[in-house]
């Protein structure tokens, strides 16, 4: 790598919500900082995922920053569950309100980051030819930002248009009068399929795995309710911190409340009544569904019954019924009109469990059971989650060790914040933290504040470097695994992206922290209170370990 031409106190990689707030905090501290962003605008996942129907699955009034009273009082949300366009507008407002764009280099991808042990600085190379240097490097690359590009035979020979939900054209796609095939029924597929069905002449849905969803119940925000939330934000933010998910039960009602009732305590008659009352919402309404196999199996059958009641064609209903995995082991998807879409005469469901994809043809797709012709192919094929974005960058720490090689058998990080042998390299909502199992905006804000305070602590004490003690890192990784063990998330039949099971060749290991936001925050606060227990600091050539141990 050439000699650096630009030097900074800190470089932030990514200009989504995490990158924007991190840049703001660094500048407030008087540090020189730069953010690198691949896109030509801010927003991260909300910049790229512009597919029809894209919508947040956390209520808007809580999917927001709380660090600025003026910001949270000044912004007006229009819906309970904000659409992609509204979240993107909000993040652009944040960038403008705090004048952040002047310190962001757009259309710039980080290709390599190498730690210079003698200088104790990170040297970074970009695809634009920049050679940069920084004491701190903060990876705000996101948990769902490395799209999977499936290796379907014949894909390059398809004569129609191919679009990925993770990179939908900004100008949109005119589907009127066109036949559309969509592969994938995860969160993106569930959101876009009802809209594609309305726009296309005919829609073919190629389902690899049936999905559990629950209704979004979205609606316009009542002005009085928004005013109430704004008047009570201090209490609501406090409740977020004390919750498992980073969402306040008080502000959003039953949809995000933590259930206390047990399904196994209900009689058959009571279960039937609950199904009539809750419908598809049964998947979120009982505490024992996630922890007890018997309860989960009952809930699965109740869920299938709701599908059978909703779908007109019994054969289509059975094809939509999940059978391979329990409720909750994969991301639970919020939907609007997903199942009733399959009652439309211009929608055809192809269950790939009955015969897989053999090849993409010039005019469509061939399965073992037949061929289908269409003009547009939509790939809702997901992400290499949690670690994909980091592993795609050539990151080298001490002794030229690569992060990809260290994480080959699963990510190893202390608190999801730092990894041993990679000093001063912070990860926001990294593996081993609640991240994707929580309100991401809340978890982002907590991590950014922790990182900023840590950097301030280092400056006050003359420390040059910070990294985890190996023992502390090992114990945290073991704790994360133990927390998930025995839950529905790690069921043998579950092949979720939480485990990396959707990526060929990726080691199956549960990556987010299942202990909840409250417990995780308490641990982070405890570590700091104990003089950064489990971390090792270096000052002027001397190593000064903080007390190790978990």
Image (cartoon, grey):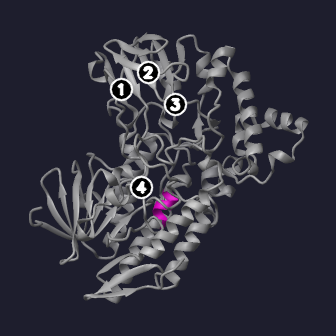
- Separation (CA) of disc 4 from disc 2: 30 Å
Q: Which mark is residue 185?
A: 3
Q: Which residue is mark 4?
A: 409
Disc on res. 434? none
Is residue 308 inside the magenta stretch?
no
Report the Cα–Cα distance between label 3 and label 2: 15 Å
Question: Quick check: marks 3 and 2 in contact, CB under 8 Å?
Answer: no
Q: Quadrant of residue 483?
A: bottom right
Is tag 4's residue or tag 1's residue first in the polypeptide sequence? Answer: 1
The local crowd at label 4, few if under 14, some if 14 to 19, many if 20 or more residues have their Cα within 10 Å, is few
Q: Position of residue 527 (x, y in %)?
A: 51, 78
Mark before the other along the chain sequence, 3 or 4: 3
| Closer mark to the observer between disc 3 and disc 4 | 4
**Residue placed most toward the observer, 74 or 440:** 440
Residue contact between numbered discs 4 and 2, judged by CB atoms under 8 Å? no
Residue at 62%, 35% (x, y): give it.
212
Snapshot quadrant of residue 334: top right
Check the image and report above or below for 448 versus 391.
below
What segment is highlighted magenta in the picture?
A: 441-446
Please identify, in this view, whether the residue under mark 3 or under mark 2 is nearer the observer.
Answer: 2
Would you call the spot at circle 3 few (<14 residues within 10 Å), some (14-19), or many (20 or more)?
many
Q: Which residue is mark 2?
A: 357
SS under mark 4: loop
Looking at the image, is mark 2 or mark 1 earlier in the sequence?
Answer: 1
**Spatial distance from mark 3 to mark 4, Cα to Cα?**
28 Å
Marks 4 and 1, how far apart at CA: 26 Å
- Describe the element under mark 2 as helix, strand or loop: strand
Which residue is identified by label 1?
Answer: 152
Horizontal and vertical percent for residue 57?
A: 55, 44
**Quadrant showing the C terminus:** bottom right
């Amino acid at each position: 790598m050439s000699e650096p031409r630009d030097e900074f106190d800190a470089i932030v990689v990514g200009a989504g919500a995490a990158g924007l707030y991190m840049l703001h905090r660094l500048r407030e501290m008087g540090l020189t900082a730069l953010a690198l962003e691949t896109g030509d605008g801010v927003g991260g996942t909300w910049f790229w995922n512009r597919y029809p129907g894209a919508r947040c699955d956390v209520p808007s009034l809580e999917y927001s920053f709380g660090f600025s009273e003026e910001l949270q009082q000044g912004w007006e949300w229009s819906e309970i569950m904000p659409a992609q366009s509204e979240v993107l507008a909000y993040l652009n407002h944040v960038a403008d309100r705090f004048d952040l764009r002047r310190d962001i280099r757009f259309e710039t991808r980080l290709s390599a980051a190498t730690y210079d042990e003698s200088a104790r600085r990170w040297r970074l190379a970009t695809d634009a030819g920049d050679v940069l240097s920084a004491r701190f490097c903060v990876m705000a690359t996101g948990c769902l930002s490395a799209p999977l590009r499936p290796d379907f035979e014949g894909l390059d020979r398809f004569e129609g248009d191919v679009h990925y939900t993770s990179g939908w054209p900004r100008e949109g796609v005119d589907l009127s009068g066109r036949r559309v095939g969509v592969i994938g029924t995860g969160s993106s597929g569930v959101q876009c399929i009802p809209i594609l069905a309305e726009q296309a002449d005919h829609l073919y849905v190629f389902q690899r795995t049936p999905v559990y969803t629950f209704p979004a119940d979205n609606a316009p925000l009542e002005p009085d309710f928004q005013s109430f939330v704004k008047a009570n934000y201090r209490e609501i933010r406090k409740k977020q911190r004390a919750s498992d998910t980073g969402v306040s039960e008080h502000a959003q009602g039953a949809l995000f409340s933590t259930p206390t009732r047990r399904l196994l305590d209900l009689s058959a008659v009571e279960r039937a009544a609950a199904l009539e009352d809750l419908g598809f919402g049964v998947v979120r309404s009982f505490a024992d569904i996630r922890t007890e196999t018997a309860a989960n199996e009952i809930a699965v059958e109740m869920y299938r019954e709701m599908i059978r009641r909703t779908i007109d064609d019994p054969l289509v209903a059975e094809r939509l019924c999940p059978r391979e995995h329990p409720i909750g082991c994969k991301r639970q998807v919020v939907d609007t009109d997903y199942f009733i879409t399959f009652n439309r005469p211009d929608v055809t469901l192809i269950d790939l469990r009955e015969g897989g994809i053999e090849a993409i043809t010039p005019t469509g797709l061939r399965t073992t059971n037949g061929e289908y012709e269409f003009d547009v192919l939509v790939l809702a094929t997901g992400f290499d989650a949690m670690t994909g974005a980091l592993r795609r960058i050539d990151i080298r720490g001490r002794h030229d060790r690569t992060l990809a090689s260290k994480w080959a058998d699963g990510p190893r990080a202390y608190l999801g914040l730092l990894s041993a042998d990679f000093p001063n390299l912070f990860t926001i909502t990294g593996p081993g933290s609640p991240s994707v199992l929580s309100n991401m905006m809340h978890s982002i804000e907590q991590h950014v504040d922790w990182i900023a305070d840590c950097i301030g602590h280092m400056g006050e004490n003359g420390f040059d470097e910070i990294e985890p003690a190996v023992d502390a890192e090992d114990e945290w990784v073991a704790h994360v695994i133990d927390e998930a063990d025995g839950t529905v998330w790690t069921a043998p039949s579950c092949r979720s992206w939480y485990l990396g099971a959707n990526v060929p060749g990726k080691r199956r290991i549960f990556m987010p922290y299942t202990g909840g936001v409250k417990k995780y925050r308490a641990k982070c606060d405890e570590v700091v209170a104990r003089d950064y227990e489990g971390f090792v600091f270096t000052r002027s050539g001397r190593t000064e370990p903080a007390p190790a141990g978990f």
